[in-house]
Image (cartoon, rainbow, N blue to C red):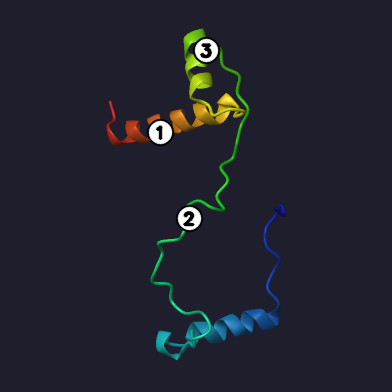
Amino acid sequence: MKKGGPRPLTPQEEAELATLAELSEAAIDTSDAPEIRDWSSARRGLFYRPIKQQLTLRLDADLIAWFRKHATKGECTTPVASGRLSAHRRVSRQFPV
């Protein structure tokens, strides 16, 4: 991903956008981009990548053993712990203390 903002629009691009903004919805030809009505095969969060931050925690041995037990073979315990913490956060927001 490139850092910084997008490049500025050229005068030609600005003029084209201004022309499109003046058109009514009915006047815009969208035949080359048909409306999608069936979203059953859509995948939520496919391109979303949350920002990760490194953190060191000292956890009880039984808690670490639980995370290791619930990780699939060859999987690091970090995604398991992160998933469980995220799930807890979602539930906590629904039922605040």
Write down the residue under mark 3: 59
Q: Nearest the camera: 61 or 13?
A: 61
| Image vertical order of residue 6 relative to residue 57, above or below | below
The kind of residue tagged 3 is: Leu
For residue 87, the mark is: 1
The kind of residue tagged 1 is: Ala
Q: CA distance from mark 1 to mark 2?
A: 19 Å
Q: Nearest the camera: 19 or 31?
A: 31
Q: Earlier in the sequence, mark 2 or mark 3?
A: 2
Labels 3 & 1 near each other (Cβ < 8 A): no
Write down the residue under mark 2: 43
Image quarter (top left, top right, bottom left or bottom right) of the C terminus: top left
Q: Residues within 10 Å of mark 1 (few under 14, many from 20)?
A: few
Depth check, mark 2 against mark 3: the one in front is 2
Q: Nearest the camera: 35 or 2?
A: 35
Q: Position of residue 5 (x, y in %)?
A: 67, 58
- For label 1, the SS is helix
Labels 1 & 2 near each other (Cβ < 8 A): no
Q: Position of residue 87 (x, y in %)?
A: 40, 33
